[in-house]
Amino acid sequence: MTRKLRLPVDSLLPEVIASLRHSSGLVIVAPPGAGKTTRVPPALLDAGIAGDGEVWVLEPRRLAARMSARRVAEERGEKPGETVGYQVRFEEVSGPRTRLRFLTEGVLTRRLLSDPQLKNVGVVVLDEFHERHLQADLALALLRRLQRTVRPELKLVAMSATLAADPIAEFLGNCPILHSEGRRFEVAIEHAASHDNRLLHEQTAAALRRLIAEGLDGDVLVFLPGAAEIRQAQAACEGIAAEAGMLVLPLHGDLPAAAQDRAVSPTSQRKVILSTNVAETSITIDGVVAVIDSGLARVASHSPWSGLPVLNVARVSQASAVQRAGRAGRTRPGRCLRLYTAQDFAARPAHEAPEIQRLDLAEPVLELHAAGITDPSSFEWFEAPSPHSLDAADRLLRQLGAIDDDGRVTETGRLMLRFPLHPRQSRLLVEAERRGVADDACVIAALIGERDIRQTGILSDRRDERSEAAAATGPSDLLYLLDLFAEAEAAKFAPERLRAMNLDPGAVMAVDRVSRQLRRMLNKRPAARVHSDPQADEALLISILTGCPDRVARRRRKNEAELLLSGGGAAVLSPASVVRTAEFVVAVEIEDRRQQRQNSRSSAPLIRLASQIEPEWLLDLFSDALSETNELRWNAQAERVEATSRLWYGQVLIDESRSVTAEPDKAARVLAEAALNAGLRAFIDETELARFLARVEFVARTFPEAGLPELTEADARAALAELCAKRRSFAELREAVRHGGLISLLQAKLTAEQIALLARMAPERTSLAGRRNVRINYEAGRPPWIESRLQDFFGMTAGPVVAGGRVPLVLHLLAPNHRPVQVTTDLAGFWQRIYPQTRRELSRRYPRHQWPEDPLRGQAKDSRE
């Protein structure tokens, strides 16, 4: 057994044990370095607080779970897997004698599904709860629910360095709160004097050079946001470190366990440890005397487009910065160089926002449904998420077919729960297993969940020669990446060969590890990828669709990059995508570029990964999500009503058909609207209509006792609209008007007696002595009139009359050139006073015509005009 150093929390252990003998819960607040992670759990086990059961410790990260288990096992003189074990995603080290387990938070919720009562567990410790990971919040709520119902003897302990203890103590039934002093030495903190515009790896190298020049006599821990920044800093720092006889070692979650152990284990050489925020809490790295803090981290959130977890580089909170600095004072006084200003530090939030406020909830909500909680909004959370987030999670799970309308987990959902993945990836695997392509689907699921295996820069918005070569035309970016992975596999994953292929060795190895673990879960053996198997590729494309049913998109125009999204709005396909011609796709990964809009020519979301689909697949898989609209529209070019039937998937048009068959009433309304917009003159001679309206107005004015209505152009428009009934085109409407339909509808507003009166008192034509039948002209506000050749009136002593003799017609007497020589109602007076002079003039001008001296005895012999 390794001799244990005395740690500050050791003096608190008797009080911890005494509290838990009388209480079912406990909150322990202890600063970093106090030893709570490695001392409290074994003390609980040894004191029998768990009874015959096990002690489980929830850690926020895989690295912390592995290292803590190894440290405790070492202090007990054992190897991991004996009394002390650990379990993280896809990895478990334990044995039949294991009584103390360190687990990552997601593993616990999965274990709760398989063993809802945790029958063999007596104590659960939630370590570093202040980080407020989503799975930790869910685990706490599920454990408290279990404790309040069937397991009242279950002991719950929450531990943290910076926790506000009162709220969680209240949640745990007003349990005791214990505080421990930490073993913390003074740390001298220095901020940058001003903002540094150099690249981050250049700033890191400069800070390391300064520490060495000023007499560094221990290890340096450098906090960087991610693996890519670590690789860049490693290249920049290796020369400086080598001159000082130091090792440069990376430390992040994607590294193999052996590489992580090498970074944190004691060595004969001094080390520069380039780490992500995995080294902030839970573990003490002996020998660290200086910290270089970039002030940045990849903060977990979720993409509003893909719904998958994403890590965005962001400034850490003040609490995290304090934790980082404290790493330099765990074993002796230390020093911290912050690569940002004091003003920057003061402007940061005090704490990180809990993940439950910023992450996608689909995975934990599915776990709640599996636990029988059909209404997650009624679940007693430690801190409830927003109703919008819960609704979005439920909606997605229904689209994936994981739960039914009553909130019960379906058979598909139960199969999805086998995998420690986001439900989108799990749904893809379930479908692929059904279609016989699970082997390749394991790689695709890993490609979706891990970082891109291509070297940084391949997915830039602009093409270069390298990305042009990479973006060969194909049906799916994921199938293209699958082929690249197969080539990497054929190259035995040799790092030099991978780099020559423009692949990221670390990302490729991460995908390989995850895909192998998924294959083991499905009892699948790796098989060689067959590039030319259309049936298998189609099965994979369909499987990808089942994981992204809400991400369907359609290209706006052929061969253009802009696509319309089924959820609304538009996005642009990355120039590096191989999906260059497919009309319908699913957008597997989309980058929201709203924050770039001021500096970017295009601010539309960018589709990074797309996969082709066929509309028929939507009909087969998601028929309930399809909707049909039937619309009548006016075809101005064909001048007819057309029925347009459209099939929609969300806001994406899947199919459209047109026909002239339509509901008569609706077609009539559309035709009427178009006809009235075109105007009456498009269908009827306006003079004819005006003449009829004037006839009615004349009779109504002349015979007010008859009670004729006042007919106007508005009545004519209404009649035109009425005439549209059972018709669909202007051609049909004009034919109806030509056959008197419009006038007939206007006449229908008169009684039979009024129609007869109109015919008698305002006839449309009249006969002259010359046997000529002429039209009577009626105009509103003017007396009726006729016009004809002067010769047509020979033999007539008086002109025709209408209105039963009440109204003489105004006579327009025309010369042979059809110009009036006289307008009068007194034909007799014209013959007597004016005709003699008119006769002489007309005789000279038109000698071939007869101009008798006595027009009353004369009669026109030539009826030609």
Image (tube, rainbow, N blue to C red):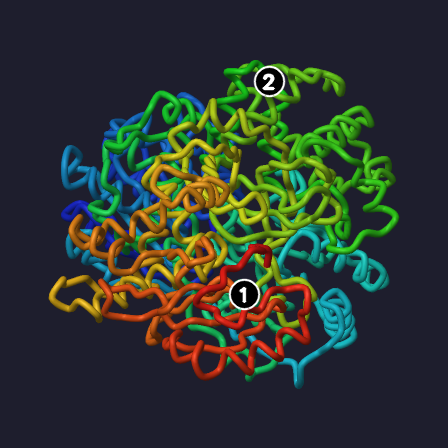
Whole-percent x, y for residue 447 in the image = 63, 36
Whole-percent x, y for residue 831 in the image = 44, 76
Q: Please tell me which residue lies in front, 260 or 418.
A: 418
Q: Please tell me which residue lies in front, 562 or 439.
A: 562
Amino acid type of the residue tagged 1 in the rendering: Arg
Q: Is residue 447 above or below residue 334?
A: above
Q: Is residue 538 above or below residue 216?
A: above
Q: Is residue 355 above or below residue 668?
A: below
Residue 6: which quarter of the image? bottom left
Q: Residue at x 33, y 37 (%)?
A: 55
Amino acid type of the residue tagged 2 in the rendering: Val
In this rendering, would 709 be left or right of 599? Answer: left
> Quick one: label 1 or label 2, which is nearer the N terminus?
1
In this rendering, would 53 be left or right of 660? Answer: left
Q: Identify the mark at residue 164; answer none if there is no mark.
A: none
- Residue lying furthest left in this view? 705
Q: Identify the mark at residue 324; answer none if there is no mark.
A: 1
Instruction: Name the residue beneath numbered marker 2.
Output: 437
In this rendering, would 647 be left or right of 253? Answer: left
Secondary structure, mark 1, is helix
Answer whether residue 308 is visible to the viewer in this image. Answer: no
Q: Please tell me which residue lies in front, 8 or 783.
A: 783
Whole-percent x, y for residue 607 in the image = 63, 48
Q: Residue at x 27, y 67 (%)?
A: 697
Q: Please tell me which residue lies in front, 527 or 509.
A: 527
Residue 130: which quarter of the image? bottom left
Spatial CA distance of label 1 from label 2 is 46 Å
Q: Is residue 442 above or below residue 7?
A: above
Q: Quadrant of the C terminus?
A: bottom right
Whole-percent x, y for residue 150 in the image = 15, 33
Q: Residue at x 21, y 48 (%)?
A: 380
